């Protein structure tokens, strides 16, 4: 449909959003009547979340640099309620939103090896985590079912404070890196530091990036 929201990453520039939904999350902005907006993804705009042209001065490079990033899933299997369950995790897509740890810490615990142990939780709890994971880094296969993402809600662009754009049900005009990546929910880099642009790879977390930070040059 022509009025479907569409996101196009401009080369060395912002995320151009056609027919944008209202922005939610740490910043809530009514975009009714605006056919197109440009969202900052270099981390340097003084008018976040919108682009103000700072990417030019910052020398922002939108090319991904995926050296050392794993874009294939790691499978963690266990028996849950008499059913074989496999949780697939794709590291390159993880934003460190930590919804998994907050919602099912007995299953998802980075201090344990393996860090995902499906047998320590219930199917409902694991399903809740898969649905809540904003980046599509987690998928679930239960019984004979193929691995799948769970996407809830309408079209949205949610801004995480000091973090990425979490998008659901909007078309992205870009190559999806990460085997089995979801086309209906994904997280886009806002700090300019990701090695997996336009997607967030958690670099903002590692760098302790803040909305108040200045230019982020890759």
Image: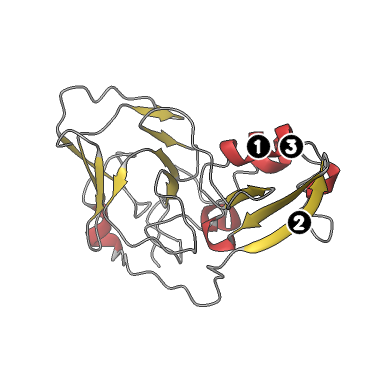
Closest to the observer, 120 or 12 = 120
Name which residue lies at 70% across and 39% down. Answer: 126
**Quarter the C terminus occupies:** bottom left
Position of residue 182 measured from the top left corner of the image (x, y, whole percent): 45, 50
What is the spatial separation of the Cα atoms under label 2 and label 3, in whole angstroms? 13 Å
In contact (CB < 8 Å): disc 2 and disc 3:
no
* Mark 1, other Cα within 10 Å: few <14 / some 14–19 / many ≥20: some
What is the spatial separation of the Cα atoms under label 3 and label 1, in whole angstroms? 6 Å
In contact (CB < 8 Å): disc 3 and disc 1:
yes
Looking at the rendering, which quadrant does residue 9 occupy?
bottom left
Q: Judge whether 189 appears above or below 130 on screen.
A: below
Q: Which mark is residue 96?
A: none
Q: Which of disc 2 and disc 1 is earlier in sequence? A: 2
Position of residue 44 measured from the top left corner of the image (x, y, whole percent): 34, 51
Closest to the observer, 58 or 176 = 176
Drawn side of residue 80 relative to residue 198, left or right: right
Colour mapping: secondary structure
Residue at the disc numbered 3: 123
Q: Which mark is residue 127?
A: 1
Name which residue lies at 63% across and 48% down. Answer: 140
Looking at the rendering, which quadrant does residue 165 occupy?
top left
Position of residue 199 measured from the top left corner of the image (x, y, whole percent): 42, 56
Position of residue 118 measured from the top left corner of the image (x, y, whole percent): 78, 48
Residue at the disc numbered 2: 77
């Amino acid at each position: 449909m022509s009025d479907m929201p569409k996101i196009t990453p401009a080369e060395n520039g912002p995320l151009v959003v056609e027919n944008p939904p209202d922005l939610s999350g740490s910043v809530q902005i009514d975009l009714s009547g605006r056919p197109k907006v440009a969202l900052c993804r270099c981390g340097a705009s003084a008018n976040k979340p919108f682009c103000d042209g700072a990417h030019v001065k910052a020398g922002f490079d939108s090319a991904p640099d995926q050296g050392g990033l794993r874009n294939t899933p790691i499978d963690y299997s266990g028996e849950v309620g008499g059913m074989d369950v496999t949780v697939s995790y794709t590291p390159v897509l993880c934003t460190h939103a930590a919804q998994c740890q907050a919602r099912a810490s007995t299953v998802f615990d980075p201090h344990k090896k393996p860090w995902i142990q499906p047998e320590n939780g219930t199917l409902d709890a694991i399903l809740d985590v898969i649905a809540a994971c904003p980046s599509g880094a987690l998928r679930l296969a239960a019984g004979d079912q193929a691995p799948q993402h769970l996407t809830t809600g309408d079209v949205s662009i949610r801004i995480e404070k000091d973090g990425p754009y979490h998008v659901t049900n909007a078309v992205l005009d870009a190559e999806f890196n990460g085997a089995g990546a979801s086309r209906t929910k994904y997280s886009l880099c806002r700090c300019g530091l990701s090695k997996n642009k336009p997607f967030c790879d958690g670099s903002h977390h590692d760098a302790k990036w803040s909305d108040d930070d200045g230019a982020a040059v890759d």
